[in-house]
Image (cartoon, helix red, strand yellow):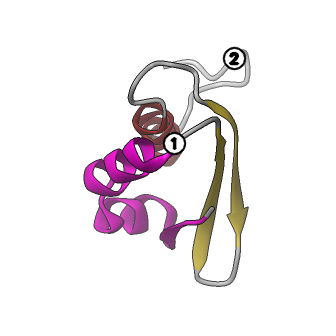
């Protein structure tokens, strides 16, 4: 795999990108483009995900919490994922 003219992407980078893509897919579960912004903020022991959604966000949050396990996130990023409003 090439990393846009900068050489090969390492396994860690590929794992992080894949997990971030999974997060994005889970947030836009209904494919209705309800998510218009999402920020991942690094704190001491956690990465805080702050999505901004239009309308009712319960389905997107439920899907994210159900499909992206804390153990996987910790293994890839070395921190817990915390979902906030």
Identify the residue at horizontal 50%, vertical 62% (top origin): 77
Q: CA distance from mark 1 to mark 2?
A: 37 Å
Outermost bottom residue: 44
Front position in the image: 84 or 10: 84
> For the residue carrying disc 1, how many other residues have a C-alpha within 10 Å: few (<14), some (14-19), or many (20+)?
few
Whether pointer 1 and pointer 2 mark residues with C-beta atoms closer than 8 Å, the reply is no
Q: Can you say which quadrant of the picture contains the C terminus?
A: bottom right
Front position in the image: 47 or 55: 55
* SS under mark 1: loop
Image x and y of residue 30, in percent = 40, 24
Which image quadrant is residue 13 in? top right
Image x and y of residue 31, in percent = 45, 19
Identify the residue at horizontal 72%, vertical 15% (top origin): 5
Disc on the earlier residue, 1 or 2? 2
Image x and y of residue 48, in percent = 62, 66
Q: Is residue 49 above or below residue 7?
A: below
Q: Nearer the viewer, mark 1 or mark 2?
A: 1
Q: Which residues are magenta?
A: 57-84
Front position in the image: 21 or 54: 54
Identify the residue at horizontal 73%, vertical 24% (top origin): 6
Q: Which residue is mark 2?
A: 4
Q: Is residue 25 above or below residue 81?
A: above
Marks counted in the figure total 2
Q: Main secondary structure of the magenta part?
A: helix
Q: Is residue 48 above or below residue 38?
A: below
Q: Which residue is mark 1?
A: 56
Magenta includes 69?
Answer: yes
Q: Is residue 26 above or below residue 4?
A: below
Which image quadrant is residue 15 in? top left
Which image quadrant is residue 41 in? bottom right
């Amino acid at each position: 795999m090439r990393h846009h003219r900068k050489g090969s992407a390492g396994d860690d980078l590929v794992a992080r990108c894949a997990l971030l893509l999974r997060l994005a897919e889970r947030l836009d579960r209904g494919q209705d483009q309800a998510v218009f912004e999402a920020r991942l903020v690094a704190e001491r022991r956690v990465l805080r995900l702050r999505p901004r959604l239009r309308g009712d966000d319960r389905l997107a949050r439920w899907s994210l919490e159900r499909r992206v396990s804390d153990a996987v996130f910790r293994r890839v990023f070395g921190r817990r994922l915390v979902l906030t409003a």
